[in-house]
Amino acid sequence: MATYDIEALKADLPTAKELAQFVFDKTNGAISLDLIGKPKDDQYQVAKNALEGKKVPSDFLTGENPYLDKKDEIPTDPLREMPPRDPNLPSPDAEVHFFGATNMPHPLDPQSDKKVYIEFRKYENGLITYTITGPVEQIAVGEKKNRYGQTVPEKYSWIDPRTPELIMRHPDGTFTKEGRGLHTYCVGEKGSGIWSMIDRDMVTVTAKNIANPWA
């Protein structure tokens, strides 16, 4: 492993950006340093340690490429987080049947070829729920010119059809508004009559039960 002189590094690489790029190159992209705002002497000591294969403090490490200028970055909207499972739903242990459909019409664009994945769950009391699990698609929004004159998106956003676990049919047999439309589709020809595979009275078999019939 090569050794480096701090004074030589200071002379050859006077800025934090140049120093971070040098370390990034010498480590084949394995180490990317966050040096901005750190004391000058600490910057060069940490860079020397990184170059010589020694330990680098975690607060000096980053996953960002030092060659990328933040001014050139295209912002991305944060992906929304799903709320926690509704505590009023039956316990997951009360689930008696599960069915997953992978070719359902997209709720945000039902007339297109886009499809979504839906999980159906039936519980001991007859309640049936559905959860749209994806897919999530990144899309470009707007246009702008970057400093090189190239046309780039203003930002990236998401087509996100996901839902938390929602009630489709109540225990008394009545459907929610969304559940009624979903049920109509599932019993019809376009839904391939999959309702019979959703509303079934069979206990979900777990991997544990397959391995041990006496569990």
Image (cartoon, rainbow, N blue to C red):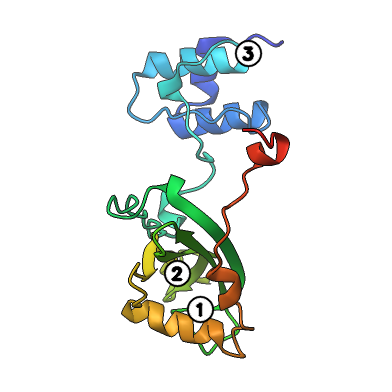
Crowd rating for badge 3 (residues with CA inside 10 Å; few <14, some 14–19, many 20+): few
**SS for dot 1:** loop
Q: Residue 87 in the image: state x and y as whole percent.
A: 29, 50
- Amino acid, disc 2: Pro
Please give the label number shown on residue 106: 1
Front-lying residue, 38 or 93: 93
Res 86 visible: yes
Question: How packed is label 2: few (under 14 Cα within 10 Å), some, or many (20 or more)?
Answer: some
Under mark 1, the amino acid is His
Q: Residue at x 52, y 19 (%)?
A: 47
Query: Outermost residue, left direction?
Result: 88
Quadrant showing the N terminus: top right
- Mark sitting earlier along the chain (2/1): 1
Residue indicated by mark 2: 161
Residue 88 drawn above or below residue 36: below
Which structural element holds mark 2?
loop
Q: Nearer the viewer, residue 131 or 121?
A: 121
Camera-side residue: 154 or 80? 80
Quarter of the image holding residue 160? bottom left
Q: Nearer the viewer, mark 2 or mark 3?
A: 2
Q: Are marks 2 and 3 in contact (CB under 8 Å)?
A: no
Up the image or down, 199 lies above or below 107; here it is above
Residue 43: image location, x then y, percent: 43, 19
What kind of residue is marked 3? Gly
Q: Which residue is mark 3?
A: 53
* Residues at marks 2 and 3, CA–CA distance in whole angstroms: 46 Å
The residue that appears at 52% across and 39% down in the rendered structure is 66
- Compared to residue 177, the image places residue 203 above or below, namely above
Disc 2, disc 1: CB below 8 Å? yes
For this orientation, the residue located farthest to the front is 214
